[in-house]
Amino acid sequence: MEDILLLEAIERYLNGGMLDEEKAYFEQLRKNTPEIDQMVVEHKLFLQQIEHLSEHRNLKHSLLEAHNRLVEKGDVYEGGEISTKGLVVQLWNRYKRVTAIAASIAGITALMISGLVAYFAPSANNSQIEQLSKTMNQVVLNQRALGAKIKEVDSKIPPNVEITSSGSAFLIDGKGYLVTNAHVLKGSGAVVVNNKGKEFNAKIINIDIPADIAILKIDDEDFTPHILLPYSIKKSNVDLGEELFTLGYPRDSIVYNMGYLSARSGLNGDTSSCQISLSANPGNSGGPVFNKNGEVIGILSNKEVSADGVVFAIKSKGIYKLVDDLKESDTTFKRIKLPANTSIKGKSREEQIKELEDCVFLVKAYNQK
């Protein structure tokens, strides 16, 4: 049933029968789901082949009608004996001075029509129909296979586990190192999901519960490292009233929020965090807080919220401390290199978000049942 509904949606999309909002949603779905995009392409090809066959049949019908009209008018003869006298009289009465030219044209026309009729004869059409039938069968098989794949839950979360918590995380090293809140990782394992919905296995390599910071490492051969991150991690403090924005996952798709620094310290005068005025949900926890230059100034933390529209962020200096502690305790992590430059300074907010969203992930923590 879902396959039929999907095909109906593709049909309406190709025929221009979707409303603007529905069309925009479907085009985004095509962009994010290669399987559906392939189905659209194949279905469009199928419709074009049907239209091509219909055009061939119509042309054949028109040619046959023209041929019959010429036969009835005496311009072309089919079968039986031809009366030479009748032909000469008819040509003389119709063309008179250009008898020879007319006769030549009539002969050429007859040859062309005969050739075209032979080309579009049933035997040729049968071959085309047979080929089209094979194509149709292959398209149907492909669509069934793709439909089955769409219905599958291609998840890297192990079976027989339960999701214990979720939040956001962002890259601090293009090789797959991410930072998030410690309270987001309430479980024995985790997967992270990028903005295209692709999941990757991840492992916790350092966690500081009192500071509420943790570092994850994507441990998955499907992950493609980022050569350069478009943002830097700021070491100095932010000015009061400075415009800030966040990206995170309070739901399955990435969400943007904008606000400003409303206090240089956090709850109860905590100097390791700051207070930000913006709207955020629990799933935003662990997400990056950027200034207008595309520099990370902190990690959003919704662990304690005292009022609506007010959240706290752990200052980015905490990231440097946690990474330094990790390098000291385990020399295998000496190669972690935090980004020092931002390439999105001066760009519009829309352009900044397009470059940033690939670096922000949804985190799903789980435990064995």
Image: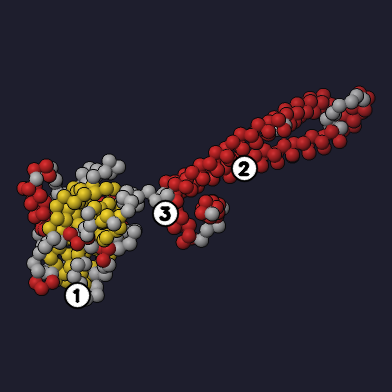
Residue furthest left as drawn = 328
**Label 3 or label 1, whichever comes before in sequence order:** 3
Residue at image location 22% in from the left, 59% down from the top: 186
Q: Residues within 10 Å of mark 1 (few under 14, many from 20)?
A: few
Residue 248 appearing in the image: no
Measure how far apart labels 1 and 2 are at the Cα level: 64 Å
Answer above or below: position of 264 versus 337: below
The residue identified by callout 2 is: 50
Instruction: Give amino acid for label 3.
Output: Gln
Q: Are marks 1 and 2 in contact (CB under 8 Å)?
A: no
Mark 1 — residue? 306
Q: Residue at x 70, y 41 (%)?
A: 58
Query: Looking at the image, is mark 1 or mark 2 earlier in the sequence?
Result: 2
User: Is the residue under label 1 in contact with that under label 3 (CB below 8 Å)?
Assistant: no
Q: Residue furthest bottom?
A: 307
Image position, residue 215 (x, y; %): 17, 53
Neighbour tally class for label 3: few under 14, some 14-19, many 20 plus, Cα within 10 Å: few
Q: For the residue labelled by badge 1, is the local secondary structure a helix, a strand or a loop?
A: loop
Residue type, mark 1 in image: Ser
Q: Residue at x 16, y 50 (%)?
A: 205
Q: CA distance from mark 3 to mark 2?
A: 28 Å
Tell me if 76 is positioned left or right of 338 in this view: right
Quadrant in the picture for the N terminus:
bottom right
Marks 3 and 1, how far apart in space?
37 Å
Q: Nearer the viewer, mark 1 or mark 2?
A: 1
Residue drawn at x 72%, y 32% as measured from the top left = 121
Disc 3 target residue: 28
Residue 22: horizontal and vertical position, in percent? 48, 60
Q: Element at badge 2?
A: helix
Query: Residue 60 in the image: x percent, y percent?
Result: 72, 37
- The amino acid type found where label 2 is placed reads Ile
